[in-house]
Amino acid sequence: MARASSSISMGGDEGSSGAREAFEQLKEKLKEISCLEGVASLLSWDQQVYMPPNGVATRGAQQGVIARVAHAHKTSDAIGTALEALSRAEPLHGSLTPAEIASVREAAREYNRTKKKPVELAARAAALEANGVAAWQKARKENDFSIFAPVLQEWIDIAKEETAAVADPGTDVYDYCLDRFERGLTVARLEPLFALLKTPLIALVKQIQAKADTNNDLLSGVELNVDTQMVVARQFAEEIGFDFTSGRFDVSTHPMTIPVGAPFDVRITSRFRETELSSGLLATLHEAGHGLYEQGLDAQARAAGLPASKPPGMGLHESQSLLWEKQVGMSMEFWDHYWPVVQRSFSDSLNPSIAASEYHKLINEVRPGMIRVEADEVSYPLHILLRFEIEKGLLDGSLKVVDIPAIWNQKMEEYLGIVPKNDVEGCLQDIHWSMGLFGYFPTYTLGAVYASMIFLAAEKQIPGLRKQIQDGKFSELREWLRENIHSVGSLYETADELIEQVTGSKLDAKCFLDYLSRKYGALYNLSSPELQATSR
Amino acid sequence: MARASSSISMGGDEGSSGAREAFEQLKEKLKEISCLEGVASLLSWDQQVYMPPNGVATRGAQQGVIARVAHAHKTSDAIGTALEALSRAEPLHGSLTPAEIASVREAAREYNRTKKKPVELAARAAALEANGVAAWQKARKENDFSIFAPVLQEWIDIAKEETAAVADPGTDVYDYCLDRFERGLTVARLEPLFALLKTPLIALVKQIQAKADTNNDLLSGVELNVDTQMVVARQFAEEIGFDFTSGRFDVSTHPMTIPVGAPFDVRITSRFRETELSSGLLATLHEAGHGLYEQGLDAQARAAGLPASKPPGMGLHESQSLLWEKQVGMSMEFWDHYWPVVQRSFSDSLNPSIAASEYHKLINEVRPGMIRVEADEVSYPLHILLRFEIEKGLLDGSLKVVDIPAIWNQKMEEYLGIVPKNDVEGCLQDIHWSMGLFGYFPTYTLGAVYASMIFLAAEKQIPGLRKQIQDGKFSELREWLRENIHSVGSLYETADELIEQVTGSKLDAKCFLDYLSRKYGALYNLSSPELQATSR
């Protein structure tokens, strides 16, 4: 733990009352930090949902001030002193509850990271984020990767410098980056996961393509009122249990979930287009899944600002959105219940002869494409694998920035059998790298694997779960998730530990492959030998 | 100026470059403070417009943290040091612009007030505000003034203690209170104003009552769609010039204007009821008038957070809302243009035979009532006079809290000829005192007087102004206000000085009386001798 620069002197031996006292001091500061994070979230939510266009510059200045204030609070001597007193009072088990001890652990982690990060480096990163996004947009506009390349190189340099300054000596740069988004995530954990997924997924995509018979013209040319779409989407969110007395649902350009004051003020958004029914509805289920997680956190601990009440990582957060979007919202049972609802809502525009099973098949169509965010759930992990391999190469020095376009296209051909016609639909498609977010992409696939494991565990523990979904009843599943995952927060140090508690097994690629094989085997009438090939 | 506790040493003789340097340091801090004020405004706006109900407690904690952070910034050594250097560098005229010098003056004023205010007193006031509003609500619910009385006594004590701690020795307590809302406002300035208004207004109200013939059943029983009302109100706001690229218009329980990031992000709200057309439309014009002021501030200076770019007081701010609501929005010319618009918008519910002049007469009906916020513009100042006299008595010790209900009712009978049947419609009707806002009420009447003076000056300087209004053209008036009032900010130390610059005369009760006599004389066919009596 970094030594605080405070001059407050303390006795060398802290008793249990000393630990309690230090914890209460820490708690007071953590609550302030939590409030400032909520304020920053509101500034961001408002900017994306309701702020008038000319407010941009002022909002940037406001965000900047709040970020500086939050940084000062996070690195304050008061926190350093309290953490130091707590470290001297160990073991804490006699004085603090397990949840409190976990909060001390999380607070120390955050304090050390923030304190160790050089101010100059943080300023460079902040400036590069603004310039980086602008350069990325320009590179896309002109379809010219070379405009973006210097930004990427600078982010690589910053990642290396930050790792050297902040992480334990000898820490691998990409491991440090991964850990920022999912505690304890390493290259060593991801490589076997992707190794297990790669060949079966490539094979499954090919098998499906050979049999593809989806009637993807089913809704072609049909225009559906966006306000009505919003009403239906709101009904979905409400019926799976998103609490509107503790949340909002609005429209923004990019769907998102923002915890303005979780668990009592959680805001989700979606977006709707007349010609795209499923996109807006499924994005709503996705965000409502994130929202249910935030609304399900331990209320007392979260309101007190205790960090152990927060989700342990992006992977587990994504598991909750994907569980509701994919495992529930793209299942046949869900549409058995909701397709009639949709048909009634759009009785003036939808062909009444379209069956629920046809719509179910349409939204589960597997078709390799260039764009990650439009990918089906079978090819999606291959998009992530490609990015994982490139990020890893960039950070371990085996890949040069200038070589990205070529390696991207080569891997697209290898994994999905298609080649981008330009970098805009290739290596310039995602905003993440322009913001320096190396290590973020793998959490999407981690989330998908977790979701399949969690849903399987829920099926085992909740009798008749699929029948409940078919009846539009979600309360038992939601409460099970709340009890086993949402309210647990970061009691365990990593999501992996929590997942093992809930499902009885460690991260399990096979569970995910089995789910895909079962679902898409049925949808595409794949014969049994083919299924075995995919899940070997 | 309070001596800053900073240990930074400085040379004794500051040259002009020293003044510039100190000003730049001051500016940096002022910008931060301005950002924090904007953040607090957004938290408040969101709470009243979009926040989910369960967010209340978390929002309170967030507001509390921002208030503490803002207080620390406002009393920071950096500001004290910069202000001290500037005070030693006087005269500043060689180094700084007049607007910059005004900002130093305003910054010093705010710094001294905040710094001198004891922390303990601020904490007591914050606690009393929460408890005070609750006690006021309970007193209203139970129609029992004695529940509210102790809160009022405590606010009186706090006002006295704050004056003793913050103001120059010998400052009158009510003068200090008045000055908080309108710089330089004193009892000595208000007493002659109200003395001039009192007798003529009482007489005018009586004369009108003797002739009252308004057909106030004109819209009785008519229900008008609130969404359509909102559309019409938005059109009004837009056409008088409220800029929606730098602002928003939403619905909230109480109409309000919140500058989230003026002049680029200014938000107004109104509220609509099916059975009350004029209430929502006129409230919108009122708030849009406030909004135009905030949008018209000097953009560069306001974005930089310079305090001299802000309005100099609540009275002048109210003059801008009342100018658009009353002088423009309740004029015959305005309804000549807009009544047909309203009729078209509600063609399914409004009787097409109602003439613009009939609607104009309806909304200008004078009828003494118990409730200030529902009062017409003739009796309104008498409601304020009553409150002014009571506040003055409470703070100079000539009136006891326990005597308020009796004196209230006695003055209502004297001024308006009516007596409240209970304290809920009497001395418990307003929230202001529960929050300790002594000195706020007089700014309403100050605003009304300013508005009549400003509109008269505008009429003299803009040829055909009334014809322009009749044609629905407001840009010349708006630009005139922007140039002469909005963009001037607090360049002058008091609103009075600005008013004299704009209108050529000092605060002029007669101008306001003339306006009322002319307008209501015509509306109610008052004979000429009666008119003379009102404006003597």
Image (cartoon, coloured by chain):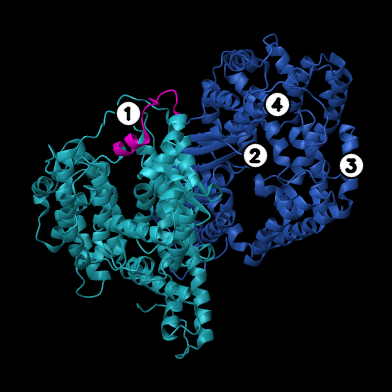
Chain colours: A cyan, B blue
Subunit under mark 1: A
Please say whether residue A50 is visible from this viewpoint.
no
Res A219 label:
1
Near mark 3 (Cα within 10 A), the count class, few <14, some 14-19 or many ≥20, is: many
B443, B62: nearer the viewer: B62
B508, B380: nearer the viewer: B380
In the rendering, at what x and y percent does residue B42 appear?
52, 47
Observer-side mark, 4 or 1, equals 1
Magenta segment, which residues?
A346-362
Sequence order check: which comes first, mark 4 or mark 3?
4
In the rendering, at what x and y percent does residue A177 appear?
25, 62
Discs 2, 1: same chain: no
Q: Rounded to the nearest whole Å, what is the CA distance between mark 2 and mark 4? A: 17 Å
Sequence order check: which comes first, mark 3 or mark 2?
2
Subunit under mark 2: B
Circle 2 is placed at which residue position? B254
Discs 4, 3: same chain: yes
Observer-side mark, 3 or 2, equals 2
Q: Rounded to the nearest whole Å, what is the CA distance between mark 1 and mark 3? A: 71 Å
Q: Quadrant of the C terminus of chain A?
A: bottom left
Disc 4 residue type (three-letter): Thr
- Dot 3 falls on a residue whose secondary structure is helix
- Residue A349 shown in magenta: yes
- Residue A38 shown in magenta: no
Q: Rounded to the nearest whole Å, what is the CA distance between mark 2 and mark 1? A: 46 Å
Residue found at x 41% / y 82%: A87
Observer-side mark, 2 or 4, equals 4
Res B409 label:
3
Near mark 2 (Cα within 10 A), the count class, few <14, some 14-19 or many ≥20, is: few
